[in-house]
Amino acid sequence: MNVDPEIIVIAVAIMAAASCVQGSIGFGCGLLAIPLFALLDPDLVPGPIFVGNTVLTISTVLRERNEIVWSAVGWGTAGRLPGTVIGSLVLARATDTSLQALVAIIILFAVALSIGPIKVPINTATLLGAGGFSGFSSTSVGFGGPPMALVIQRLSGPQFRSTMGMYFVVGLFMVVPGMALAGRFGLDELRVGAFLVPGALAGFAASGPLRKHVDARSLAPFVLFGATAAAVALLVRVLNQWT
């Protein structure tokens, strides 16, 4: 793995901005950063960005740990295991181009779910289902927030952010082994991912004073629009490569 230094600098800046968004509203880092990373250099996805995301989610949990809704974390994690297994099998067989296409398709699907008229109740079945899809997308392309966010979106801001953060932290014990078994997470990915950590920490620090003044519902459309634009650009590039 050989990522150019100028690409790393751009990636760190993207990581900082996306981390600030997630630290403020509870989601959005993967939606914004992953398609941009895939456009910059396919080697940044899914391993290296997962390193930065790990630091971000642990920081979020520590900041608002008393607000965690443990039942949502538990049932979501239970559903995540089979999704992680399927995601690791897909990742092991994916080429860089097919992985880019998968990133774009999953992001567009996640955006469609987020803006659709469906009102998802919080119960065992929906949490298990969200966990399954989240496990698949986390392992295969590096992010899994939207399915769980869709289910628990009616929680208060602190509950939403801390529950999503703990869900991600617990999921590390599934996703990292899954990516490693697929040959997509090792010392090279860890080394490149370490460069993204300062960006994640800077974005998280900036989100501290913002989270009390930012409404997730008002900012979410801008996050979804940015994610959609990046995913469409990525998909167009993949289609050009295939034709």
Image (spheres, rainbow, N blue to C red):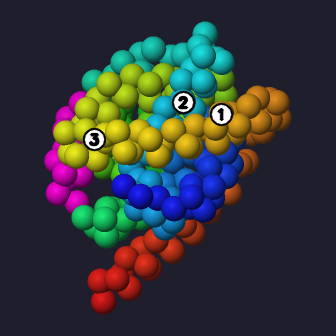
In this view, the residue farthest toward the top is 66
Q: Earlier in the sequence, mark 1 or mark 2?
A: 2
**Eyeballing the image, is 5 above or below 137?**
below
Q: Give the residue drawn at x 41%, y 16%.
A: 71
Q: Is 84 covered by the magenta stretch?
A: yes
Mark 2 or mark 3, which is nearer the start of the sequence? 2
Type of the residue with mark 2: Val
Residue 47 in percent (x, y) is at 38, 45
**What percent of the width, then of the height, locates residue 44?**
44, 54
What residue sits right under mark 3 in the picture?
179
**Can residue 145 be seen by looking at this rendering?**
no
Query: What residue sits right under mark 2 in the picture?
Result: 55
| Upstream in sequence: badge 3 or badge 1 | 3
> Residue 102 is drawn in which quadrant?
bottom left
Q: Which amino acid type is shown beneath numbered disc 1? A: Leu
Q: Is residue 231 above or below residue 141?
A: below
Q: How many angstroms separate mark 1 from mark 2 (CA)? A: 7 Å
Label 2 CA crowd tier, 10 Å (few <14, some 14–19, many 20+): some
Numbered circles on residues, count: 3
Tag 2 secondary structure = helix
Write down the residue under mark 1.
201
Q: Amino acid at mark 3?
A: Met
Residue range in magenta is 80-94
Disc 1 and disc 2 in contact, CB within 8 angstroms: yes
SS for dot 1: helix
